[in-house]
Image: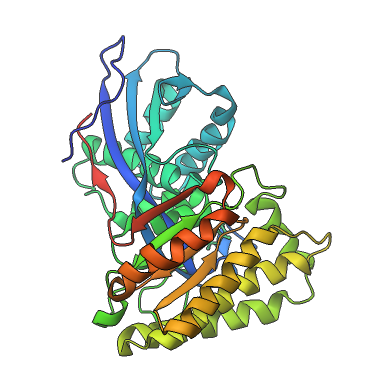
Amino acid sequence: MTNTVFPALAFEPDAQAAWSCPSNIALVKYWGKKAGAVQWPANTSISWALGDLRAQTRLSYRKGIEPGSLEFFLDGKRKESFEPKIRDFFQRVYKDDSCSTALREAIDGGSFRIDSSNNFPHGTGIASSAAGFGALALCLADLQQQWDTQRPLQMDLASRWARLGSGSACRSLYEAPAIWGLHPDVAHSSDDYAVPHTGAVASSLQGWKDCVLIVDAGEKSVSSTQGHALLDSNAYAQVRFEQAQENLGQLLVAFEKGDVESFMEVVESEALQLHAMMMVSKPSFVLMRPGTLAIIEAIRAFRSETGAQVCFTLDAGANVHMLFSPVDENRIVNNLLPSLLSHCQDKQYLCTALDRGPEKLSS
Ligand code: DP6
C-alpha cells in the first residue's frame, strides 16, 4: 500500500477506499462500438499501461447523509461540471449484474465524496478519463469487497466497471498488456472487460518506454465518444474492424517472436488507420496538426538512418506517443527527442515506463 496525501475531511466517513491507476496507450485501437450494451467495442484492442501517468482517487462514503449526493473534487477543488458524468457512471454500475445489494443500498441511501488528482499536468491534451475511471472503478470494487468479503476484489470486475465509465479505461487495470474485446486468438477475451495478456513477450519487446510529445495541449474539437458514433455511418468501418482483428493477431505473434519490425509496422499502421477513419467520417475531421506529421516523419527518418527501435502511435488527438526500446534509449533521448521539441507546444513532453499497473493507496 502506497502512502499518499489526500485533503483532510471535515467528517468521519463510514467507508473509504483509495487507488492509483495509470492511463494507457492503445497499440491496436478501439474505434467504434457494437450495439447492444454500454461500450462494447467493435473490435479487439490492446494497450500498454502509461505507468507514470496516473490518477490517484479516494472515495469516501457516508451512510444516511443526504442520500444520493455525490461531490467530485479535483486537486482539492470542487468540479461540479464533472459530476453528471460520474453520477451516470454510478447508475451504470448500480444496474450492472455484478453490483452487490450492499453497494446498491449505499448508492441509494448515502452520499459519496471523490477526491482525485492526476500526477501529470492539466492542459497537456492527455486524456485523464482512462486513469480516472480506472481508479474510481477500483474504489467502488474495493468498497463492495469491504461490505461483502465473499466477493474478493477482482481486476476483471473493476475493469468491467471502468468500461462503463469510458471504454478505454477498462484496459488501465493491468501491469501486463491489456486486451479488450472478443478475439479468437485470446482465450478468455471479452467485450465486457479487459484481460491481461498472458502469452509470451520476448525480451526485445519488454521494458519499452513512451515519450508523449505534446503538439497541442488544447481541448479536442471532436470528443472520442462523438468520433466512435461516426463509425456507424462510415463506409469503411467494416474493413477497419476486420483489419484491427488481423493486426491484433499479428501483434501477439510479434510479441511472442520478439519481432520488433513487425511490431512497429502494426503499431504505426494502427495509428494512421485511426486518423484515416476520422478523415473519412461524415462529417470528416482531422485531429493531426502540422507538428504531428513533422514528428512522424522525423521518427521514421531517424529509424531508417540509424536502425533505432523507435516508432510512433497516436491517440484521438494531435500528440505523438514515441515508443522506443530500452536498447536505444540513450540515442533517442539525447539525439532524436531534442530535435522534436520545436514541434511541441511550449516544448512540452512527458516520458513514462509502460509496465506499472494500479496500486492500492492508504486513504
Ligand atoms: C482513440 O475510451 O475515450 O483512444 O468509450 O466513448 O469513453 P468512450 O471512448 P474512449 O475512446 C478511446 C479511443 C482511442 C483508442 C483507444 O484507446 O483504444
Residue at image position (61%, 58%) is 316
> Where is residue 239 drawn, in percent x and y?
68, 82
Residue nearest the observer in this picture, 31 or 11: 31
The image shows residue 344, relative to residue 301, as above or below, that is above
Q: Locate the N terminus by quadrant.
A: top left
The image shows residue 8, relative to residue 19, as above or below, that is above
Residue at image position (28%, 35%) is 18
One can see residue 68 in this view: no
Q: Locate the C terminus by quadrant.
A: top left
The image shows residue 208, relative to residue 307, as above or below, that is above
> Where is residue 115 drawn, in percent x and y?
38, 27
Residue nearest the observer in this picture, 292 or 73: 292
> Where is residue 257 drawn, in percent x and y?
32, 90
The image shows residue 217, relative to residue 117, as above or below, that is below
One can see residue 211 in this view: yes
The extreme right residue here reads 283
Q: How is the image coloured?
A: rainbow
Residue at image position (53%, 32%) is 87
Residue nearest the observer in this picture, 185 or 23: 23
The extreme left residue here reads 1
> Where is residue 165 drawn, in percent x and y?
51, 46
Does 247 sit left or right of 144 as displayed? Answer: right
Does 273 sit left or right of 157 as displayed? Answer: right
Q: Quadrant of residue 101?
A: top left
Residue nearest the observer in this picture, 8 or 179: 8
The extreme top residue here reads 10
Does 173 sit left or right of 165 as displayed? Answer: left
